[in-house]
């Protein structure tokens, strides 16, 4: 069965104009992110309310269900319909979610901007994930990715106050870009697009503006992606999970600078700056 769910297309305006006054009493108009609640219902059961920009609500819903491991196959979902008038995403499945009460009873509240949650014993899933051992990333490709993100048109540049995530090919071509009020939502939106398109992650690179926490590492691993990059740092547990998964974790990625925390055997140093060069 190759059927894909029927999706609405309920994108909303991502920014909202407000009147402000600066320290000199001067009035002006600026754009701020248009945060709003989105409650996910699965077969008429209320599951969770997410705060989101609303740029890709259907993909966000799919990615949330996938990354919470509540639905294993995209074909099990008949439709995802978003209605902003009632701030709801209505998911209809073919056969329901088995033991949903028990599976959603245990909830871990995670760190980060925009509260993240993970249902069930999520650390128990680490040992079931195997990332490709032969995947390699060239240093020159990493630099290309950093530069692409730096120059990409974004809500952050216009209004600030959001996190961004991006999916790249192994050659550094941008495939998907998502922004949201929390990095958890941004990664879920990309996961949802990959899931809907049947896209593999074993030859992909994932970039996030947020910290590399354990949840971010786990979500990247569940997408099958061996390379995770961030312009920010990493937490101790994020590092621990990455080492356990043998994932390549790159932190502080900016200009020609990065710190490789794990998975050093995957990097190909083909663009090393000469001694004495200044890196940004």
Image (spheres, rainbow, N blue to C red):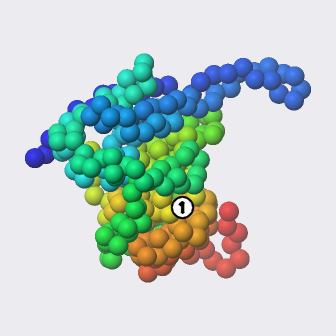
Instruction: Answer above or below: position of 255 versus 174.
Output: below
Residue holding disc 1: 213
Image location (x, y in percent) of residue 234: 58, 65
Q: Is residue 222 visible?
A: yes
Closer to the camera in the image, 212 or 277: 212
Mark 1 falls on what kind of element? loop
Residue in view at x 80 percent, y 23 percent = 21
Residue name at image x 54 percent, y 61 percent: 212
Question: For the view shown, which residue lies furthest in the right direction?
Answer: 24
Residue 43 on image: x %, y %: 26, 34
| Percent of width and height locating residue 85 | 42, 18
Q: Is residue 211 above or below residue 18?
A: below
Q: Is residue 175 visible?
A: no
Q: Quadrant of residue 114?
A: top right
Q: From the viewer's perspective, is 67 left or right of 198?
A: right
Residue 9, image quadrant: top left
The x, y position of residue 270, in whole percent, is 48, 75
The C terminus: image quadrant = bottom right
Q: Disc count in the image?
A: 1
Q: Tell me the crowding category of disc 1: few under 14, some 14 to 19, or many 20 or more residues within 10 angstroms, Cα based.
A: many
Q: Is 214 located above or below residue 184 in the figure?
A: below
Residue in view at x 38 percent, y 46 percent: 64
Q: Is residue 109 above or below residue 40?
A: below
Name which residue lies at 35% across and 73% down. Answer: 127
């Amino acid at each position: 069965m190759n059927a894909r769910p029927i999706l609405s297309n309920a994108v909303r305006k991502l920014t909202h104009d407000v009147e402000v006054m600066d320290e000199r009493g001067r009035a002006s108009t600026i754009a701020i992110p248009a945060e709003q609640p989105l409650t996910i219902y699965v077969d008429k059961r209320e599951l969770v309310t997410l705060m989101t920009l609303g740029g890709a609500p259907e993909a966000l819903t799919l990615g949330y269900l996938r990354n919470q491991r509540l639905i294993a196959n995209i074909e099990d979902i008949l439709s995802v319909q978003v209605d902003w008038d009632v701030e709801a995403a209505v998911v209809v499945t073919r056969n329901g979610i088995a033991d949903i009460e028990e599976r959603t009873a245990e909830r871990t509240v995670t760190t980060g901007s925009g509260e993240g949650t993970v249902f069930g014993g999520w650390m128990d899933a680490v040992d079931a994930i195997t990332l490709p051992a032969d995947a390699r990333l060239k240093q020159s490709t990493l630099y290309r990715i950093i530069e692409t993100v730096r120059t990409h048109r974004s809500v952050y540049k216009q209004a600030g106050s959001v996190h961004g995530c991006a999916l790249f090919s192994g050659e550094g071509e941008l495939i998907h870009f998502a922004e949201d009020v929390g990095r958890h939502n941004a990664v879920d939106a990309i996961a949802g697009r990959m899931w809907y398109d049947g896209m593999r992650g074993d030859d992909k690179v994932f970039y996030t503006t947020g910290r590399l926490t354990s949840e971010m590492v786990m979500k990247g691993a569940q997408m099958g992606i061996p390379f995770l990059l961030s312009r920010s740092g990493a937490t101790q547990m994020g590092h621990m999970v990455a080492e356990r998964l043998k994932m390549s974790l790159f932190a502080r990625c900016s200009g020609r600078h990065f710190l490789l925390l794990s998975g050093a055997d995957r990097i190909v140093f083909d663009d090393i700056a000469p001694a004495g060069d200044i890196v940004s």
